[in-house]
Amino acid sequence: MMDITEYIRDYDCEPEDQYDDALIFALKKWISDMIYSIPENGVNAVAVCFQMGMDENDRWGADASFAYNTEEYLAAHKVENSEAKWNHCAWKEDYFANADDSEAVSGCVKMWLNFKGFDTDDEEFDEEEAVYCFFGCAVNAVRQLKKDGIFNERFGKDIPVLMLWGLEYPEENALFTAAANDISLLDRDFFDMCGCSFPKL
């Protein structure tokens, strides 16, 4: 299993420029709006997802979405696989909202991609670099929200915020998620699912 301890220790999510600052601001507002719009209590985890793909008009581009699960749903749909707790595809809402639902957020993401030089129509578009940069901003936004106490205020406790890049890059998902959260909110099952050992932080 891969040890990502040093990667987490060295992880830098500080904004590089005003475009990152603007995206962080937009993501903070969006994530905050999402958690306050969840109709259930007992939420045990949420996720910020980012992937590349085709939209409803067959245009290639970036897609950001939000998901959540509840203790009640997890208990009612528990399966033998202990990783079910962390598999957002089996959550109460695996696609609760999309960044495109908010013109301000979708516009900010598109402007950020443009100003950072990430042209999704370019044959040389580097998806991995774009994803690392996006999640740097998303991790920063979540850290700020946790510092502000938003999650404790809404849910009565801190909860893990998963950072998910599609479904095919689990080691990066472990890194981004560990960087965004207090490590005690995660467990060995999460890191096992991502092919990583539990970080020694």
Image (cartoon, rainbow, N blue to C red):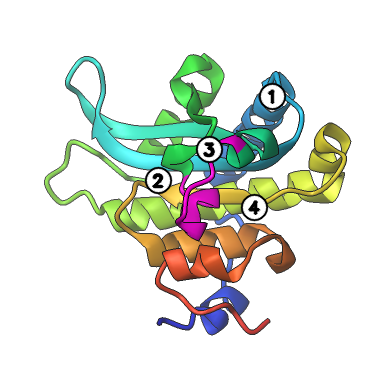
The amino acid pointed to by label 3 is His
| Residue topped by disc 2 | 116
**107 left or right of 124?**
right
Q: Quadrant of residue 52?
A: top left
| Residue topped by disc 3 | 77
Residue 74: % across, % down: 60, 40
Separation of marks 4 and 1 at Cα, in angstroms: 17 Å
Which one is nearer the viewer's eye here, 160 or 34? 160
Residue 139 in magenta stretch: no
Specify whether residue 14 is in view: yes
**82 left or right of 155?**
left
Separation of marks 4 and 2 at Cα, in angstroms: 17 Å
- Numbered range of the magenta stretch: 76-87
Separation of marks 2 and 3 at Cα, in angstroms: 42 Å
| SS at mark 1 in the image | helix
Residue 140, numbered circle:
4
Name the residue at 57% across, 77% down: 198
Residue 162: % across, % down: 56, 50
| SS at mark 4 in the image | helix
| SS at mark 2 in the image | loop
Residue 54: % across, % down: 22, 28
Give above or below for 61 relative to 162. Answer: above
